Image: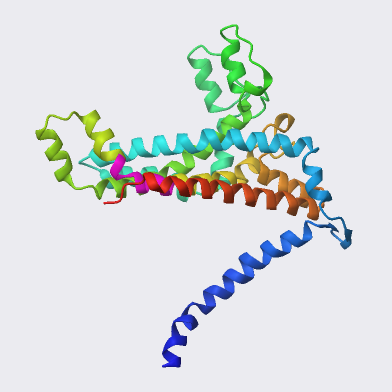
Amino acid sequence: MKKNKLSPYLYILPAMIIIIAFRFVPIVLSFIISFFDWKLTGVDKFVGLANYAKLFTDQEFIQSMINTVWFVILVVPATIIFSLLFAVLLNNIKWLRGFFRTAYFLPYVTSMVAVSIVWKIIFQQRSGLLNYFLEGIGLEPLGWLNEPTGIFTMLFNNFGITLPDWMGGPSLALFSIMIVTVWKSIGYNTIIYLAGLQNIAKEYYEASAIDGASKRKQFFGITLPLISPTTYYVLMMTTIVTFQSFSQIYLMTGNPAGGPQGTTSLIVYYIYEAGFINLDFSYANAIALVLFVVILLLTLIQKRLEKHVTYE
């Protein structure tokens, strides 16, 4: 009897060892290191909350947090909206559905390194394909990855309206990286949404059509509520992944550090810069713990949204 009770735990023991060794132990060590002056050569001294106090006066950290907030609040909704749009279109396609599904999913399975290099070439100011297109339609070329001016400032300046700095929005350089991030992540979320759409019983639409409901009313009255579990999942996962964005920043605007005037330095990139460029591992761990707390709090807030999710 005792052997039978112990057997299930033996099956999950290898996975638990891996999780503890590579998840929980690093988190605990990171928390401990953040209270010390930890250099490449080892521990210097205990500094208490000094690393955390430094965050409030570190302008680069504050800038990276502002950049990250802009990045998340624009990338996450855009990813969800476009993914749902493409999923609805794919769900209504009767021919070559497999081909289009593969075409949308390909960017997601493509290496971020390859994607970043290709898009960096597209965004080049002098010979990039995007500026070549803009010139072809009579518009001025833009310094996509080299422009620190906020996109809202650039937009309203065309109408003679001057915005305060805090309303200027993310820089054009960061907005360019947002485009790449959304483009790459759409494929995965589209497939998730497509699976959700195909699980909706057709009887709902047939009954509403008999009652005279238009396609618009069917979408907002049937489709959106019944795919709310999918939207809830996509929202949580996209938010977490977006906060952890690094590769595209490093590859597209990593030199100089953080792009033009630091406007593309996201929080994870700043952790890398503090730890592996400035070799201040204790400060880097303090920033990482702050990011962990921010993501945890957002996840708990989003968890409260589950009461609005419709489960059949």
Q: Is residue 12 visible?
A: yes
Figure quadrant of residue 38 = bottom right
Q: Could you tell me which residue is drawn at 23 percent across and 47 percent down?
A: 200
Colouring method of the image: rainbow
Q: Could you tell me which residue is drawn at 55 percent across and 22 percent down?
A: 131
Tally of numbered tags? 0
Q: Could you tell me which residue is drawn at 36 percent across and 38 percent down?
A: 84
Position of the N terminus by quadrant? bottom left
Q: Could you tell me which residue is drawn at 58 percent across and 45 percent down?
A: 243
| Closer-to-camera residue (252/269) | 269
Figure quadrant of residue 64 = top right
The x and y percentages for residue 262 are 72, 33
**42 sits left or right of 193 in the view:** right
**154 sits left or right of 223 in the view:** right
The x and y percentages for residue 307 are 39, 47
Quick one: which residue is furthest to the right in this view? 44
Q: Is residue 257 visible?
A: no
What predominant SS class does the magenta segment belong to?
A: helix
Q: Which residues are magenta?
A: 225-234
Quick one: which residue is furthest to the left in this view? 210
The x and y percentages for residue 25 are 67, 68
**87 sits left or right of 7 in the view:** left
Q: Is residue 175 above or below residue 222?
A: above
Is 142 colored magenta in this rendering?
no
Q: Is residue 212 above or below residue 37?
A: above
| Closer-to-camera residue (127/293) | 293
Is 233 colored magenta in this rendering?
yes
The x and y percentages for residue 78 are 46, 34
| Closer-to-camera residue (297/229) | 297
